[in-house]
């Protein structure tokens, strides 16, 4: 897709933060409520722009497939290192603005069945 004023170019950088917890006794993923890692992601992205940070959910950010016990977050920067909205060219799974999920203990992600 060609870059247009309404659709940012895919050139730039995608910053991905993946957070997960592992039970030290079993080595298996543990439940991770989204409120705390969402705040971590907001803090990490705050040096650029938290207004454009995204929560991807419990997914592999490259494939969009479910990943139990982890949360993925992403921030997109253009070639001038300015935060931009998620470019349609790289959208492989739903993106939810961090401002929409901030401080929530539970996050309900709508699905289509």
Image (cartoon, rainbow, N blue to C red):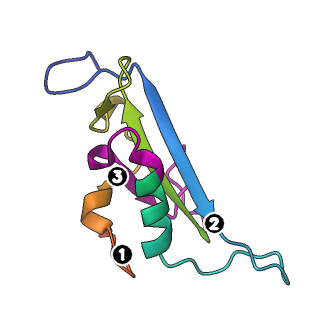
Note whether residue 58 is visible.
yes
Question: How much space separates mark 3 and mark 2, taking CA atoms?
Answer: 18 Å
Q: Pointer 1: what residue?
A: 107
Number of marks in the image?
3
Element marked by disc 2:
strand
16 over 9 or under it: above or below: below
Residue appearing at x 36%, y 75% in the figure:
107
N-terminal label among 3 and 2: 2
Residue appearing at x 39%, y 57% in the figure:
55
**In the image shown, does 7 or 83 lie closer to the viewer?**
83
**In the image shown, does 87 or 78 lie closer to the viewer?**
78
Q: Which stretch appears magenta?
A: 44-68
Note whether residue 113 is visible.
no
Is 33 included in the stretch rendered in magenta? no
- Dividing the picture into quarters, in which one does residue 92 lie? top left
Residue appearing at x 61%, y 70% in the figure:
68
List x then y, in percent, for residue 88.
30, 34
Q: Pointer 2: what residue?
A: 20
**How many residues crowd around disc 3 within 10 Å: few (fewer than 14), some, or many (20 or more)?**
some
**In the image shown, does 90 or 79 lie closer to the viewer?**
79
Tell me the tag on residue 90. Answer: none
Farthest left residue in view: 6
């Amino acid at each position: 897709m060609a870059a247009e004023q309404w659709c940012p170019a895919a050139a730039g950088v995608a910053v991905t933060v993946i957070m997960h917890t592992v039970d030290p006794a079993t080595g298996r993923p543990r439940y991770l409520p989204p409120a705390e890692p969402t705040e971590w992601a907001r803090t990490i992205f705050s040096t650029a722009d938290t207004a454009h940070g995204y929560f991807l959910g419990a997914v592999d950010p490259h494939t969009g497939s479910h990943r139990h016990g982890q949360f993925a977050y992403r921030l997109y920067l253009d070639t001038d290192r300015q935060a931009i909205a998620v470019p349609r060219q790289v959208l492989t799974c739903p993106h939810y603005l961090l401002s929409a999920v901030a401080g929530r203990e539970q996050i309900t992600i709508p699905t289509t069945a």
